[in-house]
Amino acid sequence: MIELRDIYKIYGHELVLENISITLPETGMIGLLGKSGSGKSTLLYILAGLDLKHGGKIFVDGELSLIKDKKRIAIMLQRHELVSWLSVHHNIRLYDDFHSSLFPSLSLFHISSYMHSAIPLLSLGQRQRIALNRSFYYQPDIILCDEPTASLDHQCAQEVMYTLKEYAKEHLVLVASHDEELIHEYCTDVLTLEDGHLEGHIKKRNKGKSTAFHHDYKRFFVLFLSLLKGHLSSYVRLSFVFFVTMCMLMACVNMTCSFRKEVQSYLHELLPRDALSFRCTSCPLSLDKEKYVSQVFLYPEDYELLGISLNPQRFNQRECIEVMDESQGVKRVSLGRYARNDNEIIVSRTLFNRLGRQLNRSYYLYYHHGRKAKGVKVKVVGVSFENKKIEIYYRRRGNLTLIEQCFHHKVNYRYGILYYTRGLSLSYLIRKYPELHFKKVGKKSEDQVSQFFNKIEAVLFLFASLAIVSTIFFMCANIDELIYKMRKDIALFYCLYAKKGQLFVLYYMFVLSCFLFSSLLSFLCINYLMIFINKEVIPTFINARFLLRWPYLSIIKMMISSLLVVIFITGYTLRKQLNIDIVNVLKEN
C-alpha cells in the first residue's frame, strides 16, 4: 500500500500542489481529472520518482521510501517519448537494456504493420501505441498514464482503456486525462485536482502481488551498437580529432627516438660499448695477455696519422687519403688474411675500394710529429667489413711500432683503450692495475646525447601538448553536444529507471571505442608512412642509412597516458551532463 502525506510542489514562485495526502491501493484503476496546468503530470512524476524536488513524505508498506525502490513502475508520458535511433521492437523492449529481464514479446493495439518502420516516419497515433506497448511489456506493478488516448481515434482509445482496466484487476493503474467520459466509464475511482488540492475518494481494496526488481548490463552491447549507428556523424567527428592528435604524437615520438638511436649507434661505432679507457705513462705488457682482453690500443703523445699514400718519397696532401686508425681488434677478416707482423695492416671495405681493391700491395702511412711528416712502409693483407668508421686495423700495439720505425725513437703515450669480450670483470682489472684508472668508453658522451635528446623531446612534447589541450576542449565540446542532443533520450532512460552508472558505462563505451579505433588507425597510417619513407624518400633524397624505427615502449607509454587523459575528461564531462532535470527536459518541445 502506498501513502502520500502532505505532498506539495513549488515551480518558481507558484504553488502547483498543496498538501496532497492520499492512500493508494495495490490494485485498481484510478482516474485523475483536472484542467491543464493543474498539476496532474507533476503528481505522476512525483509518484514515479522522477521529480524528487518536492515536499512531504511517501510511505510504501509502512516504510518511508521511494515507490520505485519497492515496485516496478511504468510511466506513459504525455509526449509518448521514443528513441528515434532505435527500432520499434527495441523501443518496446528498452527496459531490458537496463535490467536483468526478458519478458515475452508483446504486440497490442495493432502495431505489427509498422514494426519495421523508422520512428521519425511514424504518426503521433502510431508512436502512442508503441509507447503503450512499452508500458505493458515489462509487466509493471504500477502503470502511470499521462493522457494515454490523446492521439488516438475513439475506437483505439476504447481499446486502450479496456486493456488498462483488465490489467488493473491485478495491478495499480493511474490515468490522468481530460476525457471525463472515458475516465468515468472505465475508472472505478476518480480524483480531481483543483487549485493544487486533490478531491475525491478511493475505496480500499485487497493487497496484490509485487514482482521483484533487478538490473544489470545484459543487453548493453546491442544498445551500444544502436547508439553508434544513430550518432555516426558525431562518432566520425570525434574519431577524426583523436586520429589527428594520435598521429602527431606518434610521429613526434617516432622521430625523436629514431634520431636518438641513430646517434647512439654512431657513437657505438666510434666508441664501442665493450671498451675501457685508461690513463698511464707505461702500459704493462701483461694487460694484453689478460683473459677476455681482445685488443689494447695506445694513443701516442704528439703524433698524428695524416693518411695513407703510394708515394714513398714525401708527404703530398693531394695524394694522401685521410684515414682513422683508432683500432679495436679485428674479429673477422672477410678478404685476405690476418696480419702476421707490425708492418702488415687490415683495412675497411671503404678504404679498400678507394685504394683500388688490391691486396698484398705496399703503401706508406704518414705521421706528423713536431714540424716533420714521415712515412713508413706497410702492406695491406686483409679486408674487414665490420666497422665502417675505423679504416685501419693494426696488430696489438702495432701503431707504436710503426711510429718508432718512422721517427727512430721511443714513443710516449698517456691514454689507451682496452677492448674486451663478455666475461671480463672490471673490478678485477681495477684491483690488479690501480694505476691505469679505468673508465667506460663513451659513457659521458652517451649521457650528454641522452640529455640533449631529452631536451628536444621536452620541447616537441610541449608543442604536442598544445594539440592535446585543444583536443581535450574539442572532445569536451563534442561530448557536451552529444549529451545535449540526447537529453530527451536520457530522460526516457531515467523513466525506465536506468541507473546513472549504466549511462556512464554506455557513453564511456562510446568515447573509449572511438579513442581505441582512432589510435589503431593512426598506428597503421604512421606505420605505412614509415615504410614508404624508409624505402622511397630516404634512399632517393637523403642518401643516408638513417631509418625510422618504432619505439614500442615509448609508444605504449604515450598511448596509456593519452587513454588516462581521455578517461578523466570523459568522466568529468559525463558527471556534469548526466545530472539533468528529468521533468523539465520532458516538458521541452
Image (tube, helix red, strand yellow):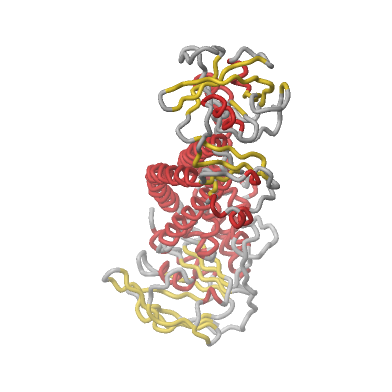
Q: Nearer the viewer, residue 263 or 442?
A: 442
Q: Nearer the viewer, residue 550 or 309?
A: 309
Residue furthest bottom in the image: 62
Q: How many marks?
A: 0
Q: Nearer the viewer, residue 273 or 95?
A: 273
Residue at point 38%, 45% (across, down): 462
- Residue 478: percent from the left, percent from the top? 42, 47
Residue furthest right in the image: 337
- Residue 132: percent from the left, percent from the top? 56, 59
Residue furthest front in the image: 409
Residue at point 51%, 73% (across, down): 30
Please state if 318 lies on the left or on the right of 214 as rendered.
Answer: left
Residue 357 seen by the camera: yes
Residue 584 lies, with reference to residue 292, above or below; the image says below
Residue 463 lies, with reference to residue 322, above or below; the image says below
- Residue 200: percent from the left, percent from the top? 44, 79
Q: Nearer the viewer, residue 27 or 53?
A: 53
Residue 126 seen by the camera: no
Give the position of the N terminus as an image quadrant: bottom right
- Residue 573: percent from the left, percent from the top? 42, 57
Quarter of the view holding residue 283: top right
